[in-house]
Amino acid sequence: MPGALNGRTVAVTGAGGFLGGCLVKRLATSDCRILRVSRSALPPLDASRATVIDAIGDVADRRAWDAVADADVIVHFAAQTSVAAIAVLR
């Protein structure tokens, strides 16, 4: 599927996590636009062919979804993985 995403915008939620980060690194070799969604600032990508745009926010906030509304593809990897954090939310 090389080139299938050329010219497209791919939004990746959880871009700072393991799976999201791996996908972003792979996408960086394509001629696409990557919209990285993360709760905190991410380091720049080195030697990326892709255009990288960062959106800082929490996917529990509607504004994060508004930021990715025009993406051609959305890959949702954001997750709450801490049991202690989930208990606080209840």
Image (cartoon, rainbow, N blue to C red):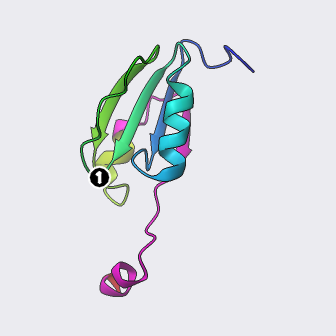
Check disc 1 and give the amino acid type.
Arg
Q: Is residue 78 above or below residue 25?
A: below
- Quadrant where the image shows the C terminus: bottom left
* Residue range corresponding to the magenta coloring: 67-88
Q: Is residue 82 above or below residue 13?
A: below
Element type at marker 1?
Answer: loop
User: Would residue 83 appear left or right of 7 to someone viewing this image?
Assistant: left
Q: At 55% across and 38% down in the image, what residue appears?
A: 23
- To which residue does mark 1 refer? 39
16 drawn magenta? no
| Furthest-front residue in this view | 46
- Quadrant where the image shows the N terminus: top right
Q: At 46% across and 13% down in the image, what residue appears?
A: 49
Q: Position of residue 44 (x, y in %)?
A: 30, 29
Determine crowd level at label 1: few under 14, some 14-19, many 20+ residues with C-alpha closer than 10 A: some
Q: Position of residue 57 (x, y in %)?
A: 28, 49
